[in-house]
Amino acid sequence: MCKSWVSSLVSFAPPTRHPGLLEEPKFLVDEMLQRLGRWLRAAGYDTVIATDAEPDYYLLRQAINEGRLLITRDRELSLHRSAKDNVILLECDSLEDCAKALSDQISIDWHHQPFTRCMVCNTPMSSATNEQIQSAPKDIRDSDDAIYYCPQCRQVFWDGSHVKRMQRHLDDWQNKFTASRQD
Ligand SMILES: [Zn+2]
C-alpha cells in the first residue's frame, strides 16, 4: 500500500469515531480534567472522574477493563504501549479549550442525553415516582420542573435554574464545536 494513498485515506476518513470505538463512548477522565468530565456527564455520557492522584497505570488499566476511553493531558501516559485506541490526549488549558480539543478528536454530541445521569455518581436517573417526589421542596413539586431520582444516591434532583444555565452552555458548545466539524 503506497504511503500517499494511506495518508489520503486518513485525511478523508470521517473523524467521527476513535479507532477503538465500536459503540457509544464511555469515558474515564484523569483528575486534571475533572471539570471536563462533569460536562461530559451533564451531556449524558457515562463518565468516571478520577478523584485522587491515582497512578497512571491504574487509570489505564481501569479504562481498558471497563471499555472506557481515558482522557488525559499526560503525554507520557499516551505513549504507553497499551494506550493505543484507549487514550485521548488533550493539549489544552481552559475548560473551553479542552472541550474543543476533545470535540476535534472524537465526535461528541453535547446534546447526547443531557442531565440523564446523576452528576454526583454517574448513575442513570429515572423519573421520580410520586412517593420519591415527596422529598423535593414544595415549590419544586408545585412547579413544572421535571424531577428525577438517582437510585444510587437515593436522592431526587430537578431541572432548576442551574440546569437551565448548564443547558445553555451545552447548546453553545454544540453549536461551536459540533457544527464546525466536517463529518
Ligand atoms: Zn447518584
Image (spheres, rainbow, N blue to C red):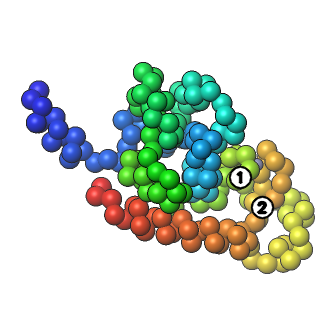
Q: Quadrant of residue 13?
A: top left
Label 1's element?
Answer: loop
Q: Amino acid at mark 2?
A: Phe
Residue drawn 59% across and 60% down? 114
* Mark 1 and mark 2: Cα distance apart in space: 8 Å
**Considering only vertical position in the picture, is 77 above or below 117?**
above
Q: Answer left or right for 40 relative to 5.
A: right
Please tell me which residue lies in front, 75 or 151. 75
Residue 3 rendering spot, x and y as whole percentages: 12, 31
Q: Amino acid at mark 1?
A: Cys
Residue 175 rendering spot, x and y as whole percentages: 43, 68
Residue drawn 11% across and 27% down? 1
Residue drawn 70% across and 70% down? 162
**Does the closest atom of ligand 1 sit within 8 Å of the Cβ of label 1?**
yes
Residue drawn 33% across and 59% down? 181
Query: Which mark identifies residue 158?
Result: none
First in sequence: mark 1 vs mark 2 = 1
Residue 28 rendering spot, x and y as whole percentages: 58, 39
Q: What residue does disc 1 label? A: 118
Q: Quadrant of residue 32?
A: top right
Mark 2 surroundings within 10 Å by alpha-carbon count, few (fewer than 14), some (14 through 19), many (20 or more):
many
**Considering only vertical position in the picture, is 109 above or below 26?**
below
Query: Which mark identifies residue 157?
Result: 2
Mark 1 surroundings within 10 Å by alpha-carbon count, few (fewer than 14), some (14 through 19), many (20 or more):
many
Label 2's element?
Answer: strand
Q: Answer left or right for 183 relative to 150.
A: left
Residue 61 rendering spot, x and y as whole percentages: 57, 24
Please tell me which residue lies in front, 154 or 167. 167
